[in-house]
Amino acid sequence: MALLAVLALGASWWLVSALATARNRTSLELAQNARVLAEAKQAVLGWVVEQAMTDNYPGRLPCPEPSAHVGTANEGVAAPYAATGTTCSVAAGTVGIGRLPWKTLGTDMLRDAVGEPLWYAVTVGSTGWALQTSATVLSINSNKTGGLTFDGGTVVAVIIAPGRPLNINPTAAQAAAGCTARTQSRSATPPDYRDYVECHNLAGNAFVRTVVSNATQRVFNDQLVTITAQEVVTAIENIIHKRIRASVVPQLQAVAYTGAEWGLTALTPVFPYMARFQNAGTFNPDTYQGNVGTSQGLLPVHAQTCNSLTTGRCDTNFNTASAFVQWTTASITAVQTAGTATTFTADCTSSTVLLVRCTINYSQVLCLLTCGINSTFRVRADARYVGRTFKTLNTAGASATPNATAYTSGLSLSAALQNDANASARVTYTGTFNGGSATGICGFLIALLCSGSGTVTIPIAVFQDHAFLNPTSADSWYWFMANKWYEVSYFSVAASHLPSGATHNCTSAGDCIALASAAAPNVASNISSMVVFAGRSLTNTSRPNSTLSDFLEDVSGYASPAPNRDGDRNFAEGTYARKTYNDRFYTLTNY
């Protein structure tokens, strides 16, 4: 009996020790995986930050390693890679999945507790966070959310410690949750992701942390760490701020109407009306067309050309009778302002909303046989909506074509922004027709009549998009437009520096913008135009939306309860704090 008791006690000790060892091993593996996954996450975010300094898509994530790289000299290198395929490793839908591209990230090959390399999944393509091909155009800004679902929330990427291979034989409930029967074999080259990760619905962009009944029917042993959109944007926010100051602010300063062709100077800049931030309680940028009378709102980045970069803010009716910017035909006039011609007629009835066309006839009685006649003309026309977006004036775009025996001189094209309901620009084209044909010769030096004619044409294309609106990938501000950071850039202009301004001098008009700073006692009160970069949402609300408080933060300690949201000319800049304040202010013009 004593011997049996000793044997029973020994067996119990062995069983408890074995169970304790298994539990300890699992705990140690989980802890080891957590450390490796955290290291991998920091490596990915570090790569994002490094690329954000110069990349056309700051915030983009790397693609996974293509399976074809495994076992080659390119092992650990992310797609796209010309030597082994130009696309991101796409398993299904818009999810790229493959091994973590450790060499691209600048780390050693990171492995989980059982020695398996880590796996990595990210959304790819135009709606994702990684380049599907080298030609993909991304749109990453602080409004963008994750593309992957993870336990009911959204993330942009997951990193996976795959653990040991499993013989997956799911129950009906587990199959309904996305688990597929499979005996995982890890000897194949290249590797198949299904032999490493389990129960994730890649077609639905869905990943999970646990699976129903997994404790009794083992079908899932992945350990994951996620990367969220907020983590990515937070990591690059300071870089975005620096890039806006370096490459975007100079462009915004240049889009002001200041040249002699507009009748303005650098001291009297005029900006177009802002696109309205909201209307009737909804976010309503009106394809980013400026709204007449609006001095605060979104940048009026409406473009005449439609392409992948300008989708959603372009003129789909460009060069048709319904074009956004067009001539107001009733405004077209042509007159003689000087010259020896005694009669002058002009017919502009063939003009359209896209082209001013005036046929001019002029004559002089008893002129020199050499037809020393001349007629100085002025053609005027109003082009609607020029003051609702950023335009340049092609001063060589108009033409005056005389008859065969005459010539032109002194041609000049200018435009002046008007204070009217159409935010028009009044174009004035002047020049002189010289000479003509002699008829009815009456003497050696004198002809009975000299006459001439000519045609003046001014296409609406004399108004062209400012380069800021439709940059090429080589332009330093391309990243700003391609990633739609204008969605979170709030623009304010003193009323006197809008097309409706009388003096275009906010100091004399008394309507300059004031910016108080929490970091200094002084208040700048001579600002004529300013842009505010709103950064990411600190309230975790989905944007864009019509709630300005989800974009701009309040700053306590000022007389106005919400100085940055009340629509007046007074703004307040707080001290940058990652969790409570992230607005950045940029003065464009001042006195």
Image (cartoon, rainbow, N blue to C red):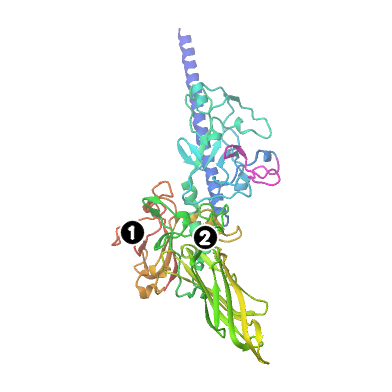
User: Toward which corner of the image does residue 572 lie, by quadrant?
Assistant: bottom left
Q: Which mark is residue 243?
A: 2
Considering only order in the chain, which callout, 2 or 1, is on the residue closer to the N terminus? 2
Residue closer to the observer: 568 or 9: 568
**The disc labelled 2 sits on which kind of residue?**
Arg
Give SS at disc 1.
loop
Q: Marks 1 and 2, Cα distance to the nearest angstrom? A: 28 Å
Span colored in magenta: 72-96
Instruction: State the image coordinates of residue 476 (x, y, percent, origin top left).
Output: 57, 61
Residue at point 57%, 81% (across, down): 375
Instruction: State the image coordinates of residue 435 (x, y, percent, origin top left).
Output: 63, 82
The residue singled out by tag 1 in the image is: 566
Residue 74 can be seen, yes or no: yes
Residue closer to the observer: 113 or 214: 214
Residue closer to the observer: 425 or 542: 425
Quadrant position of the C terminus in the picture: bottom left
Residue at point 44%, 74% (across, down): 268
Residue closer to the observer: 299 or 423: 423
Residue 32 can be seen, yes or no: no
Q: Is 200 in the magenta?
A: no
Instruction: State the image coordinates of residue 256 (x, y, percent, origin top left).
Output: 48, 68
**In the image, which is nearer the foreground, mark 1 or mark 2?**
1
**Residue 193 position (above or below residue 434):** above
**The disc labelled 1 sits on which kind of residue?**
Asp
